[in-house]
Amino acid sequence: MQRKPAIVIGGIMLLYIVLRLWGLTDACFWFDEIFSIHAAEHSWSGLVPFVAKDLIHPPLFYFLLKLWITLGGEGQFWLRLFPVVFAVLALVPFWLLCRELKLRLVTVAVAFGLFAVNGALIKYAQEVRMYSLLLFLSLTSIWLFSRFFFRGKSFWVLVIANVLLVYSHYFGWFVVAAEVTAILIAQRIKLLQILLMAGAVAASFAPWLFALFHFAEPGSSVRQNIGWMPRPGIGSLFELVFDLVDPFYSQQSTIDPTANFIIAVPMIIIIAGALAVYLLRFGREENRDRIFFLLGLCVVPLLLAFVLSWLLPVSIWGSRHLIIIFPLVILLAAHVLCSERLGKWKFALIGPVAILIIAGFLQYARATQYENIWCAWGRLENELPARHPKTVYVFEDLVAYQLWFATRRDEETAVVKVTGVPGIAEDKAYFLPRGFDGVKQINLSEIDADRFWVMFRDDEWNVEDPPINALAGLGYSIRQIAAIRTRSGTAFVAEVTR
């Protein structure tokens, strides 16, 4: 590699790493991250049954997280560093894929720049979930498949990578399907080999399918896990496009805007304009086979996710699941922006893209950090009496799980979930893990204690609102102890006596 491009790309790689370390511990662990840590805290023999009961994710990430915890403990920085490691490792197959596709250095530099600043990729690199592992393994698989596709090399390494891939996330199967489709369409001479690969991956997956059927609770369904996810439409596709192009910004909760429109919309217009000019001159493209290669590996997973989300009883659509196509779309966008087919226009387009990225960074750096309400429950636990047995009643699974996690080392605190309280509407996207008995559940009518504490959320303290009115109806007196106001409501802790 020439010295100047090497310095530029190396600098972008450093920026990529810094952005994923920036603000790593600013927010508390949220519900899904808590499940990850909870799963990894199980014994080796207990981990598979616990994860299998959850139904929706294979176990590889949880096994690796358990090893990580064994090495360095459960400090917040250490745990959040775990997904960052895989996000950084993803740079290696991304670079090797660029080389395999014989992209020009300027295209590689632009691709690395877009890869580094993508807001969704930054977000999922910092969550203690399997998405950065999925990114790394899917990129590794696609790089190895490109070697097999163009040069007939790395077949058995590809098989191993794909086994790991499907054990990291079910969407890994869409990458395998895309690879089989590419061979079926373009290189049928390798069809037996690619079918052998798919068969070997399927055979390796059989033990996990057995574990699912063996450990799943009777009557359990993925509808409880993902039944809240809407089936995709035009709006969902636009949201995906925004996630693909938005530098630095990503939606943190449902009350946030879908995108940073002032930056994302011009980015889309510029890339779409470049694509239009590119397509008009596509007949002169020298690397058409490699462009079609990337395009096919993007389209097949996208189509499968879209179609299956309409055919299956529940939708499986989600931008975080489609992280498998993010680097490929970025490579295509970089190729279009840097194509010689654009002539002098490419410089007129890359410049505004760079300005928009800088503007996005300035907004990102100055953005106010808001506390989400789920971070309040652990803090409110500090308001409870110390070194005394205490029971805390909560009224939502979301609150129960967050509070249980914060107090799980405290043998003096018991968390109890109360059901049957009129007016309490739970978010069905969150529920206590199946097979988990760390939180006792009782009905409102079963409360029979002289003194306990409650935690709940509301817009403001109001004795006419649940659960205060329900407890008062049982003859209890309720005294507010502390409150934490957040942008999505106020978290309260109160003492209840009779």
Image (spheres, rainbow, N blue to C red):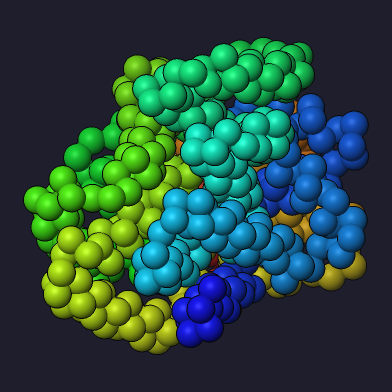
**Up-down: is 427 above or below 80?**
above
* Residue in front for this viewpoint, 454 or 151: 151
Task: Identify the residue shown where x is 18% and y is 61%.
Answer: 341
* Residue in front for this viewpoint, 314 or 166: 166
Task: Identify the residue shown where x is 37% and y is 31%.
Answer: 300
- Left/right of residue 258 with respect to residue 39 in the rendered view: left
* Residue in front for this viewpoint, 188 or 237: 188
**Up-down: is 496 above or below 484?**
above
* Residue in front for this viewpoint, 410 or 7: 7
**Up-down: is 394 above or below 429?**
below
Quadrant position of the N terminus in the picture = bottom right
Residue 333 point in image, percent of width and height: 30, 58
Task: Identify the residue shown where x is 28% and y is 50%.
Answer: 286
Q: Is residue 105 visible?
A: yes
Which quadrant of the figure has residue 274? bottom left
- Left/right of residue 126 with respect to residue 457 in the rendered view: right
- Left/right of residue 413 with respect to residue 447 in the rendered view: right
Which quadrant of the figure has residue 24? bottom right
Task: Identify the residue shown where x is 41% and y is 59%.
Answer: 103
Which quadrant of the figure has residue 153? top right
Number of numbered tags placed on the structure image: 0
